[in-house]
Amino acid sequence: MKLRPFAPIAMVVAPIALLAACQNGEDAGEAGDDMNAASEAALGDNLATDPDMAGTSEANAALSGTGNQNVPKIDTSPRAIEAARTRAAELVGGSANMDAAPTPRRLSEDAADTAAMVKAARAMQSANGGNCFEAVSYSASWAAKLPAEFPVYPRGNTVEAAGTDERSCALRAVTFRTGVPKNDVLAFYVTRANDAGYSVEHVVKGGDNVLSATKGNSAMVVYARDLPGEVTEIDLVTSKR
C-alpha cells in the first residue's frame, strides 16, 4: 500500500477553526498561527486508502481510492451517475422525498460570515470551547466514521479524511469527488439535514456553494465546487454532540 501526503483538509478546516476562535474573543493572529502549525503537521502526515475496507459501511465508496499519488479517475459516465443518484434517493426514502437545495444567498468573498455560518463554526468546538481542529488525525477510516445522517455521497471517491474524538470532540472532515452534478449532491445533504431536524442555510462565497446546518450543539458544513471534467468536489465537515 502506497501512502500519499495529506493536504486539502488542512486548507478546509483552518477557516472554520479560525472563525470559531475569533467568535470566542481569541486573537485572530494567534488562532491563525495555531492553525498554520496544525496545517504544517498535517502536511507531514500520510493518508492511506485501503480498498479492502470497502463494504464496511455506507462510506464504502469513499474508501476505494488507489492509494497512489493521484486521485482515482472519477467515473462521469451516465451509468455511474445514475447509479449514484439511485442510491442517494434510496437513502432518503425515494426520489419524491429529495428536497431541492434552497436558492443560495450570494456573498462577496470579503463579506462577513452569516449567523448560521458562525453558529456552525462554534459547534465545531469542543464542549469546553477548545479547538477540535488542533486534535485531528488523518486516515481514510474517518470517512467511515461520519455521522449516519451525513455519509459520503454514494460512489464518491475520498481524496482526504481527518477527524478526532479527543477533547470531547466528535469532528470529521472529508474531501471527496463525484461525477454527480453539484446541485444533486447539495440536494442530498439538504434532505439528510432536513430529515434529521437540522436548520440549513445555503450561500455562495469565495467560489464555493456552502451549506451550513445546525441542530443544538451539532453541525454539518458542506463546501461544493465544480472541477474540470464535469467533476464535483465536496468538503464535508461534521461535529455531532
Image (cartoon, helix red, strand yellow):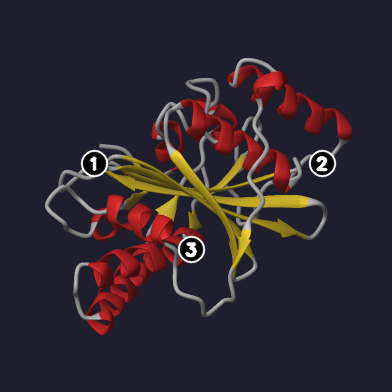
Q: Which element is circle 3 on?
A: loop
Q: Which element is circle 2 on?
A: loop
The image quarter in which residue 132 lies: bottom left
Which of labels 3 and 2 is toward the front? 2
Task: Looking at the image, tell me whether mark 3 or mark 2 is earlier in sequence order.
Answer: 3
Mark 3–mark 2 contact, CB under 8 Å? no
Give x and y (percent) for residue 169: 22, 45
Determine which residue is flagged by label 2: 76
Residue 7 shows which numbered tag? 3
Determine which residue is flagged by label 1: 165
Q: Is residue 82 left or right of residue 110?
A: right
**Mark 1 Cα-neighbour bin, 10 Å: few <14, some 14–19, many ≥20:** some
Which of labels 1 and 3 is toward the front? 1
Q: CA distance from mark 1 to mark 3?
A: 21 Å
Give x and y (percent) for residue 45: 37, 59
Front residue of 3/207: it is 207
Residue type, numbered disc 3 = Ala
The image quarter in which residue 35 lies: bottom left
Whether 226 is drawn above or below 18: the answer is above
Whether 179 is drawn above or below 8: the answer is above
